[in-house]
Image (spheres, grey):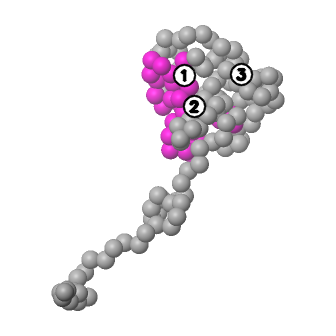
Amino acid sequence: VSFPPPPSSSSSTYSRPPLPPRGHFGPGYGPLPVPPPAGLVLRGQVTRVESYGVFLSVPHYPRSCLVHVSQLADAFGERTGRVDLPAEPWREGEEFYYVVMDSEQGKVSGSMIGVVQATGEMKDGAFGGGGGADMFNR
């Protein structure tokens, strides 16, 4: 079996771009983002309001956090009950504190229950008790 000779380097101008390092999206994109751990209190902006919940931005993470209607709370962290969205005060652009409940498969879910909106601290006994600090926006 005879194969044709390889093309000369002068006739071929195409070269394959180098592969990105492991753990990177690609050249210039940086490392893969890590979702926030459960129990972390964050402050995020409302990015979208749906009938089933509110989406809040997650600092330093490309995906939004879903706070289900059953997990919405008032300014003192008390459960508000079933809310028909869109409703006040959950409007796009407003900022709220929330606690990360889960970040399974890169999807972040949160809750406002037990989070005091004025300070961002957890009420005692809520999600493991104690205070909570927003480690990204101090």
Residue 19 position, x and y percent, is 43, 69
First-in-chain label (2 vs 1): 1
Question: Which amino acid does the dot numbered 3 rest on?
Answer: Gly
| Whole-number angstrom distance, CA of label 2 to CA of label 1 | 8 Å
Q: Residues within 10 Å of mark 3 (few under 14, many from 20)?
A: many
Query: Which residue is at a point 23% across and 87% down the rendered structure image?
Result: 6
| Whole-number angstrom distance, CA of label 2 to CA of label 3 | 15 Å
State which mark lies toward you, 3 or 1. Answer: 1
Residue 8 in which image quadrant? bottom left
Q: Secondary structure at mark 2?
A: strand
Query: Which residue is at a point 63% across and 17% down the rendered structure image?
Result: 73
Residue holding disc 1: 68
Residue holding disc 2: 109
Dominant secondary-structure state across the stretch colored magenta: strand
Q: Residues within 10 Å of mark 1 (few under 14, many from 20)?
A: some
Query: Which residue is at a point 53% across and 29% down the rendered structure image?
Result: 66
Q: Quadrant of the C terminus?
A: top right
Question: Do labels 2 and 1 touch, CB within 8 Å?
Answer: yes
Residue holding disc 3: 114
Q: Secondary structure at mark 1?
A: strand
Residue 96 in which image quadrant? top right
Which region shows up in magenta? 40-69
In this rendering, position of residue 22 left or right of residue 134: left
